[in-house]
Image (spheres, helix red, strand yellow):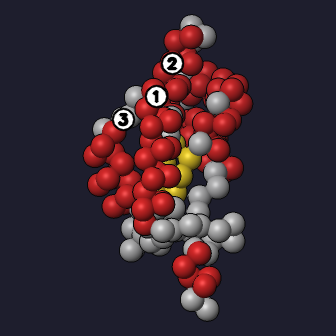
């Protein structure tokens, strides 16, 4: 029998569970404007939350081994990384996310590539002409009405 407070999942899952309630995921891919074509859209963090958590735990000399230990410190991690978790993100479809961005930067992009990823996404948005407006419409869809 597993002890009640034993870690059942990776540490990052406990952190994501706490953070995801405040995510601002859009209804379309910010590069191509797709609604996902039947697949869920992904919220891509330019700075990998897993790598940020690993670095933060090491810096703070923390080694949580139980669910209650990670849940006790996750708010501090989230607060310290608020910008990377909630602002430095982009909503992408499978094609733009997995087949393009991660093909270039790898499955687990190093934290040092965050600014390069942002520049790449911006360039792709300009290339595709998908200028997303605050109301979720694209410039091209609003001018076609």
- Horizontal and vertical percent for residue 105? 34, 39
- Horizontal and vertical percent for residue 32? 44, 67
Query: Which residue is depicted at the point 50% across and 44% down?
Result: 118
Location of mark 2 (residue): 55
Location of mark 1 (residue): 111
Considering every residue shown, the one lying at the far top of the view is 61
Snapshot quadrant of residue 17 = top right
**Res. 3 in view:** no
| Viewer-closest of 130 and 96 | 130
Estimate how packed mark 2 is, as few (under 14), some (14 to 19) or many (20 or more) residues with alpha carbons within 10 Å.
few
**Res. 67 in view:** yes
- Name the image quarter holding the N terminus: top left
Secondary structure found at label 2? helix
| Viewer-closest of 80 and 61 | 80
Instruction: Tell me the CA gap for discs 2 and 1.
Output: 10 Å
Location of mark 3 (residue): 108
Q: Earlier in the sequence, mark 2 or mark 1?
A: 2
For discs 3 and 1, the disc positioned in front in the rendered view: 1
């Amino acid at each position: 029998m597993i002890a009640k407070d034993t870690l059942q999942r990776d540490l990052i899952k406990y952190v994501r569970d706490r953070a995801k309630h405040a995510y601002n995921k859009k209804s379309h891919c910010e590069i191509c404007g797709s609604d996902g074509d039947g697949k869920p859209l992904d919220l891509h963090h330019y700075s990998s939350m897993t790598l940020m958590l690993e670095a933060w735990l090491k810096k703070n000399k923390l080694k949580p081994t139980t669910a209650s230990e990670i849940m006790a410190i996750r708010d501090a991690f989230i607060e310290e990384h608020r910008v990377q978790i909630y602002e430095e993100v982009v909503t992408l479809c499978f094609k733009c996310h997995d087949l393009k961005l991660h093909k270039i930067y790898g499955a687990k992009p190093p934290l040092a590539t965050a600014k390069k990823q942002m520049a790449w996404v911006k360039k792709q948005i300009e290339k595709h002409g998908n200028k997303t407006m605050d109301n979720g419409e694209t410039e091209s869809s609003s001018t076609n009405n």
